[in-house]
Amino acid sequence: MLNRPKLAAVGLLAAVFVAGGLAGWGGREAVERDGRGPRRGPDAMVAYLSRELDLSSSQRDSVRAIFARFDSIKARMRAEIDAQLTPEQRTRHQQLIDRAEHHRREREDSTKGKAGGH
């Protein structure tokens, strides 16, 4: 059975995974629907949400700040996971993160190529 800190870490990991998936989906939607403006990252997502939801300037600023907090939470989560790992596991964890980022960039690049072909 998981103890409380491990359960909290698993819960945080699951929440970040879901939030990342939603952010990735929204970013992909922003790229596929809009041929102008930022192509990726928080600015693309803010632009997408602004268009779809008619956000005010203050709402855009707030959403942008939320994305900044999300990045901070993701970094803290990774650090907390690393604190539970052996040095060898930390190395492997970083390799897994690097591989996931590489695949994410490849997907973005292939999506960008498809969007540019229209």
Image (cartoon, helix red, strand yellow):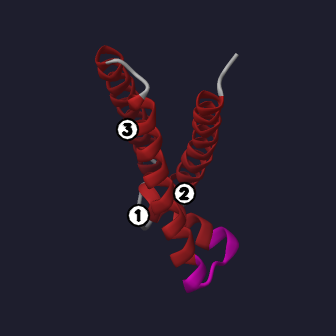
**Toward the viewer: 50 or 114?**
50
Span shown in magenta: 51-59
Magenta-colored segment: predominant secondary structure = helix
Where 98 sits versus 108, above or below? above
Q: Which mark is residue 81?
A: none
**Toward the viewer: 57 or 13?**
13
Q: Quadrant of residue 98?
A: top left
According to the picture, the residue beneath numbered tag 3 turns out to be 105
Contact, CB < 8 Å: mark 2 with mark 3? no
Q: Which mark is residue 38?
A: 1
Q: CA distance from mark 2 to mark 1?
A: 9 Å
Q: CA distance from mark 2 to mark 3?
A: 15 Å
Q: Which mark is residue 30?
A: 2
**Toward the viewer: 51 or 96?**
96
Q: Secondary structure at mark 3?
A: helix
Q: What residue appears at the point 38 percent right and 40 percent down from the top-left corner?
A: 109
Q: Secondary structure at mark 1?
A: loop
Mark 2 or mark 3, earlier in chain: 2
Q: Amino acid at mark 1?
A: Pro
Is 58 colored magenta in this rendering? Answer: yes
